[in-house]
Amino acid sequence: MIVGIPKEIKNNENRVAITPAGVAALVQNGHSVRVETSAGQGSGFTNEDYKAVGAEIVETAAEAWASDMVMKVKEPLPAEYGFFREGLILFTYLHLAPEPELTRELIDKKVIAIAYETIQLDNGALPLLMPMSEVAGRMSVQIGAQFLEKQYGGKGVLLGGVPGVPKGEVVVIGGGIVGTNAAKMALGLGANVTIIDVNADRLRQLDDLFQGRVQTLMSNSFNIANAVKKADLLVGAVLIPGARAPRLVTEDMVKDMSPGSVIVDVAIDQGGSIETVDRITTHDKPTYEKHGVIHYAVANMPGAVARTSTLALTNVTVPYAVQLANKGYAQAIRDNKALAKGVNVIDGKVAYKAVADAHNLPYASIEEVLLVKN
Ligand SMILES: NC(=O)C1=CN([C@@H]2O[C@H](COP(=O)(O)OP(=O)(O)OC[C@H]3O[C@@H](n4cnc5c(N)ncnc54)[C@H](O)[C@@H]3O)[C@@H](O)[C@H]2O)C=CC1
Ligand SMILES: CC(=O)C(=O)O
């Protein structure tokens, strides 16, 4: 199989979908890899690094896309839709629930679109989302701490406080991978931390993990309103896999926050969990202010720490890419239930229920689609 690696084109997206180690793994399995020139630059990998392990360097995005399978990091942007074609395997983050136009293009062009973020193990874990959630969760607090500084428009609160002065209040909604990593960083800085989740078992685990050093709260609008009101830094970290993020923090709750507080809505890639997060921001201009509160809503946070993120991402994506390349997508999906859950669009049908529901489109299970192919 020929595997293509285009250069990422999203604002400040410095990650790349494969490292030289990943190229080596595919080449050892008998595949060819085309890497668009300088695709690895932002992550510290040169064309020569890729050539040394057997990749072909191609000059244009079109040449990289003219492959059997394209691996990317971020969802394709409109400038890339022209490269879609029937039978192309696209293996990348897709976040289709808030992206009707992209969903329609993938359906119409009959792309086999496999989303990193919905590949799911039997225990519910999302192994290809996890490393980037670890990165974004950790970043959310360092970013929030920065924007709380006066010169960035913040209220001038140091999250750890100092002896004799109150600590900052960090409220995290969603106690999964992003939320846990945000809490670790916030505790490390010495802040008071509250984690809100809808899953009582998860709250128990968090209470054990942090040995009572965080306040856990059941997610309901009463608890959220009270917690948000006192937050210096609010981190949005909820997820219902594949679905549009639930809007848990209302505009009125944001109005109740004190001026100069900061919201980091990590869940923006699934549409955002806070009512006043009404746009996606970029690393170039990461924040806007509403009701006196600073809002940060960058959908590719890990792109800013690309070296770490590319290594962490490709550690988990490449083994699945090798399966897809070795077996072909249909057999790979039949053999690997976790991978099958990654299929969002195939043969012009939406094969992930939450995505179909988000767009009021018909849903066809992957089993049905594969049966027709037999
Ligand atoms: N902006 C960015 O650059 C990045 C964004 N993300 C996003 O961050 C979000 C969180 O990801 P993970 O932590 O990996 O997900 P996760 O599945 O590990 O955790 C989500 C948590 O939300 C909780 N939850 C669901 N509904 C809730 C509700 N109504 N109230 C309170 N909690 C609720 C779940 O019980 C779960 O514990 C996702 O949208 C993910 O795509 C991840 C990485 C980078
Ligand atoms: C998860 C995701 O969307 C990202 O890492 O950019």
Image (cartoon, rainbow, N blue to C red):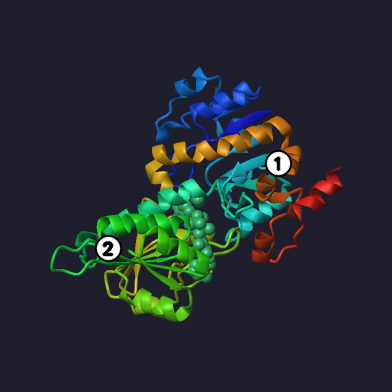
Give the CA distance from mark 1 to mark 2: 50 Å
Res. 261 image quadrant: bottom left
- Give x and y (percent) for residue 307: 40, 37
Q: In the visual, does 355 lie left or right of 294?
A: right
> Is residue 341 shown left or right of residue 93?
right
Which quadrant does the N terminus fall into?
A: top right
Whether residue 284 can be seen here: yes
Q: Position of residue 137 (x, y in %)?
A: 40, 54
* Eye-nearest disc, 1 or 2: 2
> How busy is the neighbourhood of tag 2: few (under 14 within 10 Å), some, or many (20 plus)?
many
Disc number for residue 191: 2
Residue located at (48% from left, 60% from top): 267
Examine the rendered structure and indicate whether residue 73 appears above or below residue 222. above
Q: Secondary structure at mark 1?
A: loop
Task: Point out the residue furthest to the left here.
Answer: 164
Mark 1–mark 2 contact, CB under 8 Å? no
Question: Which quadrant does the C terminus fall into?
Answer: top right
Crowd tier of the residue under label 1, counting other residues whose Cα lies within 10 Å: few below 14, some 14–19, many 20 or above: some
Residue ID at (55%, 46%): 128
Asked whether the viewer can see residue 36, the reply is: no
In front: 328, or 109?
328
Residue at the image position 35 percent from the left and 55 percent from the top: 184
Identify the mark nearer the N-term, 1 or 2: 1
Residue type at mark 2 is Ala
The residue to which callout 1 is attached is 85
Q: Position of residue 164 (x, y in %)?
A: 13, 68
257 above or below 72?
A: below
Amino acid tagged 1: Arg
